[in-house]
Image (cartoon, rainbow, N blue to C red):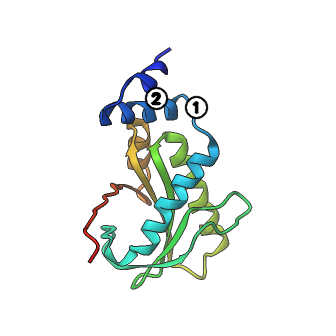
Amino acid sequence: PNESLCDDRASHSGQWICHELTASLGLYSPQDYEILEREVQKVVIGNLDGIDWEVGERLQYLGHERQTPIGRPDILLQGVESRTLFVGELKPGRARREDVGQLQSYVGWFRKSTAPEFKAVKGILLAREIDEAAKYAIEANPDLQARVFKLDISISTLE
């Protein structure tokens, strides 16, 4: 019933409410979600050296969307000094408890499948927002971390 608010509000905050409402109701198309996820993924990969992941070392890019028997993790990074594999799962909207389970399954699979190659395997959930249940799930596993992203845009005059 609140979907009509999306059409009636013209303000910036109304548009945000519309997006949140349609996303939470699952009314946007999966293709729109995939496009948004891919764009955020490109920004992360393109700015990797400028991101402080707060893991105690620099991370280098290993790949993205690598096919595994259990799915395709969004990004793979390696700790330069520690040879730790960081499996990144990206959610362009709000991350939920189910997303933490998805990340845990990737970490478990990579641990079993790549044990000699990496000294450790850890997971990073990267989302625009993380709900309370997901925060508790992350806190319960010391090998998982969560990060929130914010995309900024700047516009300048053509020189």
Pointer 2: what residue? 21
Q: Residue furthest front?
A: 159
Using the numbered discs, state the Cα–Cα distance from disc 2 to disc 1 in whole angstroms.
8 Å
Instruction: State the count of labels.
Output: 2
Could you say where residue 140 lies in the image, as x and y percent from the top left?
Answer: 42, 47
| Kind of residue indicated by mark 2 | Leu
Q: Is residue 153 above or below residue 59?
A: above
Residue at x-position 61% and y-position 68%: 110
Residue at x-position 49% and y-position 56%: 90
Identify the element where label 1 is drawn.
Answer: loop
Counting residues from the start of the chain, the first of labels 2 and 1 encountered is 2
Residue at x-position 28% and y-position 63%: 155
Could you say where residue 102 lies in the image, as x and y percent from the top left?
Answer: 58, 50
Could you say where residue 118 lies in the image, as x and y percent from the top left?
Answer: 54, 79
| Between 140 and 29, the one nearer to me in the picture | 29
Q: Is residue 106 left or right of residue 18?
A: right
Q: Residue furthest right?
A: 69
Could you say where residue 76 lies in the image, as x and y percent from the top left?
Answer: 53, 71
Q: Is residue 97 above or below residue 50?
A: above
| Between 55 and 72, the one nearer to me in the picture | 72
Pointer 1: what residue? 27
Residue at x-position 63% and y-position 48%: 31
Callout 2 environment at 10 Å: few (<14), some (14 to 19), or many (20+)? some
Kindly identify which numbered label has been placed on residue 132.
none
Residues at marks 2 and 1 touching, judged by CB atoms closer than 8 Å: yes
Identify the element where label 2 is drawn.
Answer: helix
Q: Residue furthest top?
A: 1
Q: Is residue 129 above or below residue 26?
A: below
Assign the C terminus to one quadrant of the image.
bottom left
